[in-house]
Amino acid sequence: MAPPLGYALIWNDEFDGTVLDTTKWIVASPTCEYSNNLNPANVALDGNSNVVFTCADKNYGGGIASACDRTGAAKFDFLYGYVEVRMKLGDTGNIPGIFCDLWMNGSQGWPPEIDITESGTGVVGDSCNGPNYMDMTLWFGSSQNVTNNFPIKDANGNPLDLSKDFHIYGMEWTTTFVRFLMDGVETWRITNVSQIPSKRMYITSSIYPDTNNSIWGCGTDFAHVPFPVHMYIDYVRVYQISTNIGTLDVSSVPTGAEISIDNSDEKKATTMPFQQITDIPAGNHILTLTLAGYQPYTTVFTIIAGKTTTLSPTLTPVSQTTGTLAISSSPSGASIFVDGTSKGITPGSLTLAAGTYSLRLSLTSYQDYTANFTITVGQTTTLNPTLIKISGSVPTYLTLSPLSATIRIGMTRSFIATVLDQNNLPMANVPAVFTGSNNSIGTMNPATATTGANGTAKSTLTGIAAGTMTLHASVAYEGVNLTSNTATITVRRRYYS
C-alpha cells in the first residue's frame, strides 16, 4: 500500500530468494531477544517471498530482529517514520499457548516499546483475545503504558480471523502522534506527546510458546495445538519524511468536499479560502474530491519541491435518488431488518432508495417491533420505537468468566458476566456489579456494566500491585438478587529475562 503523503522508502526487505539477509536481520535467540523460547533453526525463507517463523512444539518458536536489545548491536534502527508489514499470523486453531507479535523496541534498552500487534489465544484479556483481535500497546515507562484491543470484523460484520490470510499492519510514529493502521484503515491514534518515544527503535517479530504460562498468562493447551504452527511475513518497509516535497492549497465550490490524494486514507474537507496539505512528494499526483449530491471530481496535478500548487474546482451536482432512515430503539441494541434483510443494530443510519419498506426490530426478551415506513428523496425519516418487554422474563442464572486469571502489573484482563432468564435465554439491559476483594491489587472499570443483547456485560481489571484477589458479579433486578461464582486473580510483576 502507499505510505502516508510525504514519506519516502529508506529500508525494506521483500524476503526474495531462499536465504535470510543477515545484513538486515539478527535471527532472534535467547542471547538477544526477550524470550527464552526462540530457536534460530525455526526461521527460514519459503522461496515465495516470505520469511516463515515456525513453532514446531511446546518448547521453541522463531523470530527475527533488526537489532539486539541486550547488546545494543543494530543492523537497522531509526527515529520516527512509517512502518508497514504484510503478515499472516500463526493458525493455532484458537488453542491457547502460542503467541505472535510484531514489535518495536528501544535500541539502547527497554522502554520504549511499541507493539504494532500482538496475538495470543486464551482467557479473554490483554493480548489473549485470539486471532480476530487487534492488540496494541505503547510502553513509555517501566510501569507506564497505554493499550488498546478490539475485535476485527469483515465487511459483513463477522469476526475476521487474522491467521487465515495476509493483512497489512502499519504504524506511523512522529514527534506529535503515533497511529496504528490495518489494511490501510486507521485503528488507533495516540496524541499525548509525553507518551511518544523519542529514542531510536528497531523492529522485531516472532512466534513462540508460552511454555510455563509465565510470560502472558493466557493459559496453555499444548496437547491440542496443531503443531507445527507457522507465521508468515511477506515484506517489511520503513519510510521517513522526504525533503523533496511541496504543498497543495485546494478549495472547492461548494466547500466541504472530502479530499483524497493518490487514494490516501488521510482525508480532509475543503474549506474557504483553501485547505493546505503539506509534505507532498514532488511529481504528479491524483486529486479526488467527493461531496454528497455532487459528481466525484478527479484531476492530475504536479507538485514542485519547495513550491505551492493551487486548485479550486467547481463541483457538478447529480440527481439525487435516495433518502435516509435514522433508526433507534429503547432499549438500544435491537437487530434491524428492512424488507427481511439484516441492516445492523440500533441505533443506525441507513441510506435507501426512495420508496416504502417494512421494518422489523428484534431484541432478546422483547417483542418484535414491526412497521412500514417511507423514504423520500433528500429527506431523513426518523423512527425511535419503545420495545415491549416479554412478561415473566426474570434473571435466573448468573455466571462469571474466567474463574482464574493471571495478569501483569499495568496490564488488563476482561471479565464477562452472563445473565440468563428462567428459560436459559439471554437477558439484555440488566445491570451487573463487579466487586473485587482488594482494590489495592486490581480495580474494575466499570464497576457496573449493563448486559447487551447476548446477555453479557463486560468489565476490565487493571493490575496495580502484585498479589491475589477474588472477584464476583452480582445482579439486583426486578426483585431478584443473584451472585455469581467467584474468580481468583493473581497479579504478577511484568516479565523480564
Image: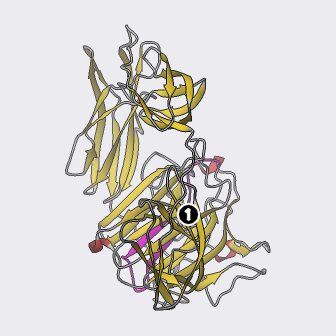
Q: Nearer the viewer, residue 461 or 306?
A: 306
Question: Looking at the picture, does residue 491 appear above or below residue 59?
Answer: above
Please state, as top left, top right, bottom left or bottom right, where the N terminus lies in the image: bottom right
**Magenta-span inclusion, residue 101:** yes
- The residue positioned 47% from the left and 19% from the top of the image is 425
**Magenta-span inclusion, residue 411:** no
- The residue positioned 53% from the left and 75% from the top of the image is 83
Q: Nearer the viewer, residue 114 or 464?
A: 114
Residue 454 spot, x, y in % from top left: 46, 29
- The residue positioned 29% from the left and 73% from the top of the image is 193
Q: Which color scheme does this rendered protein use?
A: secondary structure
Residue 430 spot, x, y in % from top left: 32, 25
Q: Amino acid at mark 1?
A: Gly
* Highlighted range, magenta: 93-117
Q: Which residue is mark 1?
A: 184
Any part of residue 93 in sight:
yes
